[in-house]
Image (spheres, rainbow, N blue to C red):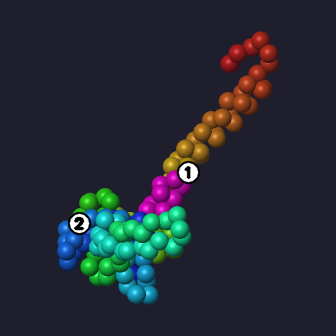
Amino acid sequence: MKVKVNDNVLVLTGKYKGKQGKVLKTYPGDGRVVVEGVNIVHKHEKARKANETSRIVTEEAPIDVSNVEVVCDKCGKATRVGHTVIDGKKVRVCKKCGASLDKAYVKKVKEQQAAAQEEAPKKRTRKRSKKAEETAPEGEEK
């Protein structure tokens, strides 16, 4: 199954065709997903205790995973999911624009790149400035 929890998906068929929502739950064994605001059903809940009241509850029911397509965050289009290997890890990618669909992996890669760019130059300049201050005698300036 190429759809994961917290993916934004577009419903392709049925009563809710064209509606977008977030995946709340997946059932890989059954090939079904629960999408926020899609396939709303009413359940009758009986009062189990003396102080409770009976009520009708609305909730999302699962739909088949073949009826949804992942929406790419970068291009905003519903797309099929492709796979590629980046840094030895298999990552889901958008077949239309090539952007990564795995949000956790994208965030992790961006953090590593930002940390690598920031740390290297700063450390060198700090050490040099500290050494220059320590070696200069008091009262004299560079």
Question: Which residue corresponds to the image point at 55% horizontal and 51% vertical from the top-left?
Answer: 116
Query: Which corner quadrant of the image does residue 124 belong to?
Result: top right
Q: Where does residue 90 sit, x and y in percent of width and height? A: 46, 75
Q: Where does residue 89 sit, x and y in percent of width and height? A: 50, 73
Name the residue beneath numbered marker 1. Answer: 116
Query: Which corner quadrant of the image does residue 66 belong to?
Result: bottom left
Q: CA distance from mark 1 to mark 2?
A: 41 Å
Outermost residue on the top side: it is: 139
Question: Which residue corresponds to the image point at 27% horizontal and 64% vertical from the top-left?
Answer: 20
Q: Regarding mark 1 in the picture, which secondary structure is present there?
A: helix
Observer-nearest of 21 and 85: 21
Q: Is residue 104 magenta?
A: yes
Residue 82 appears in the figure:
no
Outermost residue on the front side: it is: 50
Identify the magenta region.
102-112
Q: Regarding mark 2 in the picture, which secondary structure is present there?
A: loop
Question: Which residue corresponds to the image point at 36% horizontal and 74% vertical from the top-left?
Answer: 43
The amino acid at mark 2 is Lys
Counting residues from the start of the chain, the first of labels 1 and 2 encountered is 2
Quarter of the rendering occupied by the C terminus? top right
Quarter of the rendering occupied by the N terminus? bottom left
- Tag shown at residue 19: 2
Q: Is residue 114 magenta?
A: no
